[in-house]
Amino acid sequence: MDWVDRVLSVRRYSRNGERAPHKPLLLLYALGRFQREGARPIEFSALENDLNELLREFGPPRKTSAGYPFHHLTNDDLLWEVRTADGGSSPGPDLGPLRALHARGRLHPRLVAALDADSALLPRLVRALLDADFAPSMHADICQMVGLDLEDAELPSGMPGRRDPAFRLEVLEAYEYCCAFCGYDGWLNGVAVGLDAAHVRWRTYGGPDQLGNGICLCALHHRLFDRGVVGLSEERAITVSRKYVGRAATSRSLVLDLAGRAAREPQRGLEPVGPQYIGWHARQVFRGPARAA
Ligand SMILES: [Zn+2]
């Protein structure tokens, strides 16, 4: 099996579009460490805080534990090994034993050998993991946080060819080239600039390239929407996470003041964002609870 297929076939607790990026985040973290430090084993207690932070930032809103991916990734073939200080196998996902027995994890030696033999493999694996589990607007933030230093040129892009360019045009036109959250519009030489057609349910989780799953957002609101800072209620009012804090006047006017405001609707007669896609975003991405309007 090809290594890309292997990392993409890790078994996940994932049903009905539920996000479970725990193992991919551990792999990205381990690849970042590998790039900086080589293949030396990482003690659980030395990785626990970093991994928790990654799960909090980029995982689903529900609570989770670093012990799960650290242990369960050992069940997938040839990717990750865990040994205790006395040479035993992984004691399981519970934090107590992982800490007390000084469990150490490392990339599987076969994977390390493959990475050493082919310098193009690491960026390919990173690209595959990012595309499979995270909205495109998050990729650079994740690379930065796991310490992966990848030039753009090194990231063979998988997505653009599969994207539907008609989707972008359809969404931008429907919303008359205005951010549905703040009303931003802008043109450069006759071309809309700083505006995106955002998927409400991410493509990588089965969200279709259809107007009902799209919304026109400016670059800032697209980024904040994918990170769960802002979202939509069933009635398509804008929600703002209580966990988001911003003190500057611009943070207030661009984010906090949006709470409870109606999002812009598409042109009359065109399909607004569907409740099934809003529901997915609210459960899997939005960092609840929402602030009071
Ligand atoms: Zn905006």
Image: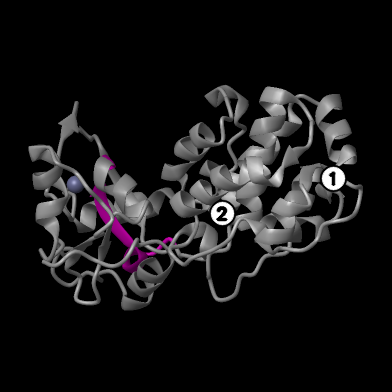
In this rendering, is residue 223 above or below 207? Answer: above
Callout 2 amino acid: Asp
* SS at badge 2: helix
Q: Is residue 69 left or right of residue 201?
A: right
User: Is residue 210 inside the magenta stretch?
Assistant: yes
Q: Which residue is mark 2?
A: 133
Q: Name the spot of residue 31 as percent of width and height, x first.
A: 69, 36
Quadrant hosting residue 110: top right
Q: Which residue is mark 1?
A: 85
Residue under the point 42% across and 64% down: 201
* SS at badge 1: loop
Residue under the point 25% across and 53% down: 216
Tell me the magenta residue range.
209-219
Closer to the camera in the image, 152 or 178:
152
User: Is residue 5 inside the magenta stretch?
Assistant: no
Residue under the point 60% across and 42% down: 158
In this rendering, is residue 131 above or below 42? Answer: below
